Image: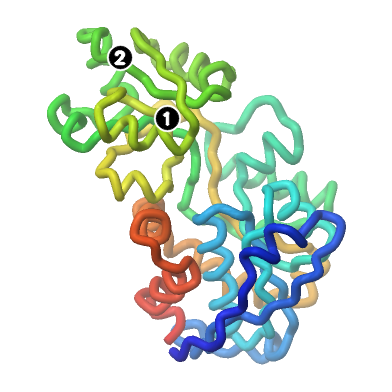
């Protein structure tokens, strides 16, 4: 692998990418050699523009797609780091990007406007795929085990001391020790029915003290003992960096947010080999790996593209 000239994109993307029109055209800044992903004759030289949202996990996923497609022979344009979920989605729907990772729960609840999630992840995926195909001509490739949903977390030390691995464990413990029911939550989560009120009703745990924080501050608040339990996202790199334990949502209350590649059906019909190249990459990931990859960026300060490249090499997808 030879790292080529890195394209300066972050500042430009933050100001010039909109849902109305993308005016950045940047080549992938890495020279990629095949590994288990072999050159695909039908993709040789095919222009493919890859977009992503503007948070760490989605940027990493975008780079993984770019590296995989480059190894297969496609001519990749890098449009990762589009500012805002809706803008990234609209860019794909409008045909300004060809490939983009998104999340089943985001589509079902935010893009399509449904009030209630579907608890089982495969059923949620099928419902999202069917509706997006019918309404927007957007197909979803088979989903990854990566599920970036809500959860409660505590420190590894606290979890080990009280034998906590699931929300049901937490509930049983807090019913016996309600003085320990100190939660840190973000403002919106604390009032939404698919957030704290709903999950508390589902499990029946007490909440003696609730403290409100910005999303990013919750991780540190749990780590430093300000609260015993905090609302987190299951693949956030700070989970690993701060030695937190995510509690299993064993009653599957929270929506499923499995990551999946979106692509316009017309483009996929022209280039069906895209699925053969991209789906195995998603299937090779899980939440534990994604936490570590995000940690390398958000805690250790590594470049997201390099983190994606190193992981792709470690899995043998590229060389």
Comparing 174 with 212, the one in front is 212
- State whether residue 255 appears in this view: yes
Q: Is residue 93 left or right of residue 14?
A: right
Q: Is residue 156 left or right of residue 199?
A: left
- State whether residue 92 appears in this view: no
**Number of numbered callouts drawn:** 2
Which element is circle 2 on?
Answer: loop
Residue 165, quarter of picture: top left
Q: Which mark is residue 181?
A: 2
3D distance between C-alphas at marks 2 and 1: 13 Å
Q: The C terminus is located in which quarter?
A: bottom left
Residue 156: horizontal and vertical position, in percent? Answer: 21, 37
Residue 283: horizontal and vertical position, in percent? Answer: 47, 62
Residue 217: horizontal and vertical position, in percent? Answer: 42, 34
Question: Which residue occupies 26% across, 8% down?
Answer: 178
Instruction: Tell me if residue 292 comes above or below residue 311 in the rendering.
Output: above
Question: Which residue occupies 16% across, 25% down?
Answer: 162
Instruction: Tell me if residue 38 comes above or below residue 202 in the rendering.
Output: below
Q: Which mark is residue 140?
A: none
Q: Which residue is mark 1?
A: 231
Q: Is residue 22 left or right of residue 83?
A: right
Instruction: Tell me if residue 291 comes above or below residue 182 in the rendering.
Output: below
Q: Earlier in the sequence, mark 2 or mark 1?
A: 2
Comparing 268 with 227, the one in front is 227
Question: Which residue occupies 40% across, 14% down?
Answer: 210
Which element is circle 1 on?
Answer: strand
Question: Which residue occupies 40% across, 32% down?
Answer: 218
Q: The N terminus is located in which quarter?
A: bottom left
- The crowding category of the residue bearing disc 1, from other C-alpha atoms within 10 Å (few below 14, some 14 to 19, many at least 20), is many
């Amino acid at each position: 692998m030879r790292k080529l000239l890195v394209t300066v994109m972050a500042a430009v993307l933050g100001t010039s990418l909109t849902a109305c029109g993308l005016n950045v055209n940047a080549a992938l800044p890495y020279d990629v050699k095949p590994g288990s992903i072999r050159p695909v004759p039908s993709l040789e030289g095919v222009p493919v523009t890859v977009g992503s949202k503007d948070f760490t996990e989605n940027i990493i996923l975008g780079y993984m797609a770019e590296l995989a497609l480059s190894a297969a022979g496609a001519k990749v344009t890098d449009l990762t780091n589009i500012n805002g979920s809706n803008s990234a989605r609209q860019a794909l729907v409008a045909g300004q990007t060809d490939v983009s990772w998104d999340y089943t729960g985001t589509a079902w609840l935010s893009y399509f406007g449904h009030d209630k999630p579907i608890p089982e992840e495969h059923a949620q995926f099928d419902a999202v795929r069917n509706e997006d195909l019918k309404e927007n001509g957007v197909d979803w490739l088979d989903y990854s085990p990566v599920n970036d949903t809500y959860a409660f977390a505590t420190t590894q030390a606290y979890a080990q001391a009280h034998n906590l691995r699931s929300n049901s464990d937490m509930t049983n413990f807090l019913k016996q020790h309600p003085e320990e029911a100190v939660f840190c939550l973000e403002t919106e989560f604390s009032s939404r029915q698919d957030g704290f009120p709903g999950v508390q009703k589902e499990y029946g745990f007490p909440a003696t003290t609730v403290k409100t924080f910005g999303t990013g501050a919750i991780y540190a608040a749990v780590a430093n003992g300000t609260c015993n339990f905090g609302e987190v996202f299951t693949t956030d790199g700070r989970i690993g960096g701060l030695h937190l334990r995510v509690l299993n949502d064993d009653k599957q209350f929270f929506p499923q947010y499995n990551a999946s590649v979106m692509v316009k059906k017309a483009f996929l019909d022209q280039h069906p080999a895209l699925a053969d190249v991209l789906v195995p990459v998603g299937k090779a990931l899980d939440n534990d790996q994604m936490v570590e990859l995000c940690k390398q960026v958000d805690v250790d300060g590594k470049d997201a593209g390099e983190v994606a490249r190193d992981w792709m090499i470690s899995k043998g997808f590229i060389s």
